[in-house]
Image: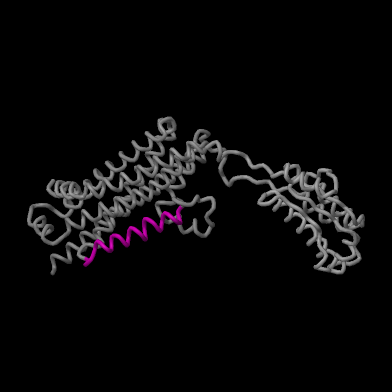
């Protein structure tokens, strides 16, 4: 087991780099878990429409002013106050109203003539969000009336008001996409393990592949070739060392997830999360094994490893849903992502919060995701063996 022992010696020399990665990731997740736990009740507060209190004084008493005041009554909370200046100021100061509209005499006439110098007289509470919203509603209504009048001058204000009323009486139903009443802990599990996919890929490629590249250096490799070790044994020992290294990293992050979310992780769902992340670990280290063999003998191979980490690890995580939920990604992006192992890893993580109501379809999706990831493990490993033997053959010829 000379190759295996050599791998572990080199890994021991890189322990400070590895520890730094683990420490940074752990601190970030412990901090996020603490902050989000404090804010969970606030985050789950349902949306409520802002109530806007308004007062109006109609001095025009025209068809337009009557339609306009009818709109104000239906869209905001109208309060009756005295029309004298002191009463208006007192109402604003005491927060009885947020916005006051005075419709001056001759408003309809000047409105039809599009006289920009003749405007509504308004008063509002300074720096109040409700006052800003009220102003937006007023401007929106008058702009709509003006557009209807330009398009159909024969329409009465009553007819225009009915058309506008159909618009502002409509209410949009707002809901979160594909949340399905997930608890905060369940959301944290999905987010944790989706992000863990990127960490595993990065660590396996950066650390695992760099160790293998050190073993492939000419002075070290020549000594190995001089010993009675076949190429098959050499690769198997190397892959076994990768498995030990990857399993150790996986155990550390699994223990961290249990510490952060003990109750959720000590369930069948937690076991499936851990199994999925272990499968992803095997995918990552088999890819690192293939990449290291591919870059064997290449100059500046460490720079090439950094490039592969950015392209494969970071790039695949962006399009597969590790950082952005798959539910908000386009179909075209997901069709491409389906050819990458990360896609199936994330798909399982997104499925597991709903696995308490497991159906045949859910089991099929789960087993399909696991199976495809293990196919990637086999393919990457076999490609690594083929590349290694090809390069060994070329080396023997030269």
Vertical order, 60 against 176 (above or below): below
Q: Which of 247 and 68 is in front in this view?
A: 68
Please tell me how many numbered marks the rendered image carries.
0
Q: Which SS does the magenta portion mostly show?
A: helix
Q: Which sits in the foreground, 210 or 282?
A: 210
- The percent coordinates of residue 321 (x first, y second) are 46, 51
Residue 299 is inside the magenta segment: yes
Residue found 16% across the figure and 55% down from its top: 231
Location of residue 340 by image quarter:
bottom left
Q: Is residue 398 left or right of residue 97?
A: left
Q: Residue at x 78, y 44 (%)?
A: 77
The residue stretch that appears in magenta: 298-320
Q: Nearer the viewer, residue 47 or 188?
A: 47
Residue 355 in the figure: left or right of residue 277:
right
Residue at position x 49%, y 59% in the image:
333
Identify the image's colour scheme: rainbow, by chain, secondary structure or one colour: one colour
Residue found at x 64% / y 42%: 47
Residue 347 position, x and y percent, is 46, 47
Does residue 87 appear left or right of residue 155 in this picture?
A: left
Q: In which quarter of the image is the C terminus?
A: bottom left
**Residue 182 x %, y %:** 53, 38
Note whether 15 is above or below 106 in the view shown: above
Question: Does the segment drawn in magenta span residue 165?
Answer: no
**Residue 369 drawn at (x, y percent):** 43, 46
């Amino acid at each position: 087991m000379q190759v295996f022992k050599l791998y572990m010696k080199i890994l021991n020399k890189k322990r400070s780099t590895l520890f730094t990665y683990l420490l940074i990731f752990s601190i970030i997740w412990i901090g996020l878990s603490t902050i989000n736990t404090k804010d969970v009740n606030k985050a789950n507060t349902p949306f409520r429409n802002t109530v806007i209190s308004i007062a109006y004084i109609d001095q025009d008493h025209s068809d337009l002013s009557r339609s306009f005041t009818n709109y104000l009554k239906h869209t905001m909370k109208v309060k009756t106050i005295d029309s004298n200046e002191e009463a208006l100021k007192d109402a604003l100061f005491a927060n009885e109203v947020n916005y006051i509209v005075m419709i001056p005499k001759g408003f309809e006439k000047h409105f039809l003539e599009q006289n920009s110098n003749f405007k509504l007289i308004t008063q509002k509470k300074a720096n109040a969000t409700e006052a800003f919203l009220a102003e937006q509603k007023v401007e929106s209504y008058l702009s709509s009336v003006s557009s209807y009048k330009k398009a159909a001058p024969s329409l009465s204000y009553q007819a225009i008001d009915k058309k506008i009323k159909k618009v502002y009486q409509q209410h949009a139903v707002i809901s979160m996409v594909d949340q399905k009443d997930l608890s905060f802990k369940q959301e944290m599990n999905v987010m944790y393990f989706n992000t863990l996919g990127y960490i595993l890929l990065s660590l396996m490629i950066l650390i695992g592949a760099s160790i293998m590249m050190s073993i492939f250096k000419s002075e070290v490799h020549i000594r190995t070739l001089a010993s009675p070790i076949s190429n098959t044994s050499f690769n198997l020992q190397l892959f076994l060392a990768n498995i030990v290294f990857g399993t150790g990293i996986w155990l550390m992050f699994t223990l961290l997830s249990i510490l952060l979310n003990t109750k959720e992780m000590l369930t069948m769902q937690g076991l499936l999360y851990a199994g999925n992340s272990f499968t992803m670990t095997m995918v990552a280290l088999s890819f690192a094994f293939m990449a290291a063999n591919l870059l064997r003998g290449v100059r500046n191979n460490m720079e090439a490893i950094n490039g592969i980490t950015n392209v494969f690890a970071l790039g695949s995580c962006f399009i597969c849903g590790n950082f952005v939920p798959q539910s908000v990604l386009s179909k075209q992006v997901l069709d491409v992502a389906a050819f990458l192992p990360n896609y199936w890893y994330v798909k399982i993580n997104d499925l597991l919060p709903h696995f308490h109501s497991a159906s045949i379809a859910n089991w099929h999706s789960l087993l399909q995701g696991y199976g495809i990831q293990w196919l990637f493990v086999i393919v990457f490993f076999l490609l690594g063996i083929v590349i290694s033997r090809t390069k060994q053959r070329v080396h023997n010829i030269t």
